[in-house]
Image (tube, rainbow, N blue to C red):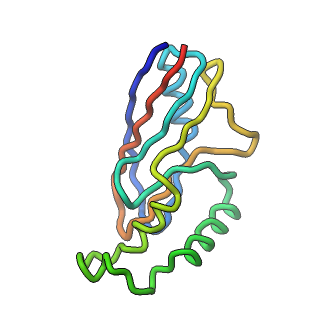
Amino acid sequence: MSVKTFDFSLNTTGDTDMVDITDDIGKALKGSGISSGVVTVFIPGSTAGVTTIEYESGAIRDFQVAVDRIAPKDIHYDHDARWGDGNGYSHIRASLLGPSLTIPFSSSKPLLGTWQQIVVVDFDNRPRTRTIILQIMGE
């Protein structure tokens, strides 16, 4: 078994910005020399997360609206009271989504559904440069 670790960066606008990283993961898998196994996708930080979705405007907007209902921006957050940075909601949203995802792959291609893409969601209240870490394990 081999283990390889890669990373790449992307720019986000914050405010539940969703970025499709499926192609980036596919390129890393092809370049890894590992044909089958699992890839773990991880985003460091406490205001962004990783998931899958059908990456089209309707589903993206539905996700953003659902997140606004679950953790609204315009309520009191003790984090904001303590730090004054106004992004308490983004920490809650990110913790609900989670910072990582594990995806099986075969023939150096992720085993995703037809309409399933891998996305990073940045919940912060400002633009960010995010680093995505991929750990590829397999044979």
Residue 107 left/right relative to 12:
right
Judge from the rendering whether residue 125 lies leftward or rightward of residue 20; answer left or right: left
Q: Position of residue 110 (x, y in %)?
A: 63, 30
Identity of the residue drawn at 53% across and 43% down: 101
Q: Nearer the viewer, residue 78 or 83?
A: 78
Image quarter for residue 69?
bottom right
Q: State the residue in front, 19 or 76.
A: 76
Residue at the spot 36% in from the left edge and 48% down from the top edge = 44
Residue 79 lies in quadrant = bottom left
Q: Which residue is found at the position 27% from the left and 83% from the top?
A: 81
Could you tell me which residue is drawn at 65 percent across and 52 percent down?
53
Image: 126 above or below 49 = below
Q: Is residue 34 above or below residue 29?
A: above
Q: Looking at the picture, how far across and down is residue 60, in whole percent?
A: 63, 62
* Residue 77 higher or lower than 30, as above or below: below
- Considering every residue shown, the one lying at the far bottom of the view is 75
Q: Is residue 76 left or right of 117 when viewed as pictured? A: left
Q: Count numbered badges in the picture.
A: 0
- Residue 139, position in %: x, y? 54, 13
Coordinates of residue 6 in the picture (x, y in percent): 39, 29
